[in-house]
Image: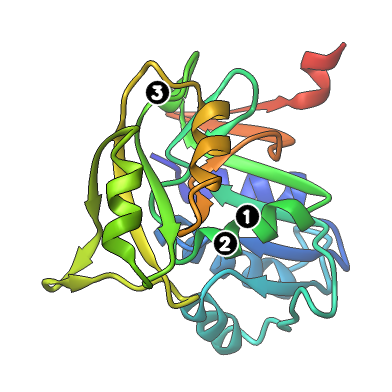
Amino acid sequence: MLHEQHIEDMIAKFVKDNDVVSIGTSKQGETFLKKLALALEHEHIPINHIEFIPTSNHLAIIAGQLKIPVTSLNEKEIDVAIEFVDAIDEHFNFIKRNSYSLVRDKMIAQSAAVLVTVAEEKNFVSRLKGRIPFEITPFGWKRTLSQLEMFGKAKLREENGKPLKTETGNYLIDVDCDEIYSIDDLDYQAKNIPGVLETGIFIGYADKIVLHNNKIVVKSRTEFKQ
């Protein structure tokens, strides 16, 4: 479990004054944003001003309530992004399954000068596998689902019996991918399917990993390059 004190420690370590910040949408992301607002009001963390790029309408509303200045990728690039992930490997590649928009998440990851990924310690693995989401266009979605079944059992993600729509107006397909495929092959081959807009596989984006259990452990990509 990621304790609130761990979140405060992460803010002190990774967020600097005047940074443009983005945070992945989740319950933990909400807590992070609220703690960030508190840091702006108190002197124990030397942050007087930040700008925030929300990854969802929900976080944009919360930022407004907390009086945190909001900007967009049309105006600014991101200094630091915090992303809560479902699995991450020793090569700093990761899978994100719960997303309001994989297209948006990938744009945030690419923009960030530093991308900090946060995961439970048990989800730091030698090889990524299992369920992977794909964001697809609603047009001809059954055909796209059929094509994605080359990788494993595929299912349209639904909410209240209807297709779940991302905030960019698309659908999500979850695929229980066969282990014979590497994540590089999956990502490349899936994007060659015309209806697939983006995947939940993030290759080469993470700069730091924060693993949490009873304590937090930080791993940096630069450590592995030496």
> Tag on residue 106?
1
Could you give the CA–CA distance between mark 2 and mark 1, rounded to whole angstroms?
5 Å
**Residue 78 placed where, x, y %?**
80, 62
**Residue 112 placed where, x, y %?**
78, 54
Residue at figure coordinates x 47%, y 17% from the top left:
127
Residue at figure coordinates x 26%, y 60% from the top left:
142
Residue at figure coordinates x 59%, y 83% from the top left:
66
Residue bearing mark 2? 103
**Residue 81 placed where, x, y %?**
69, 55
| Label 2–label 1 contact, CB within 8 A | yes
Q: What's the residue type where badge 3 is placed?
A: Lys
Q: How crowded is mark 1: few (under 14 residues within 10 Å), some or many (20 or more)?
A: some
Closer to the eye: label 2 or 3? 2
Position of the C terminus, as image quadrant, is top right
| Label 2–label 3 contact, CB within 8 A | no
Position of the N terminus, as image quadrant, is top left
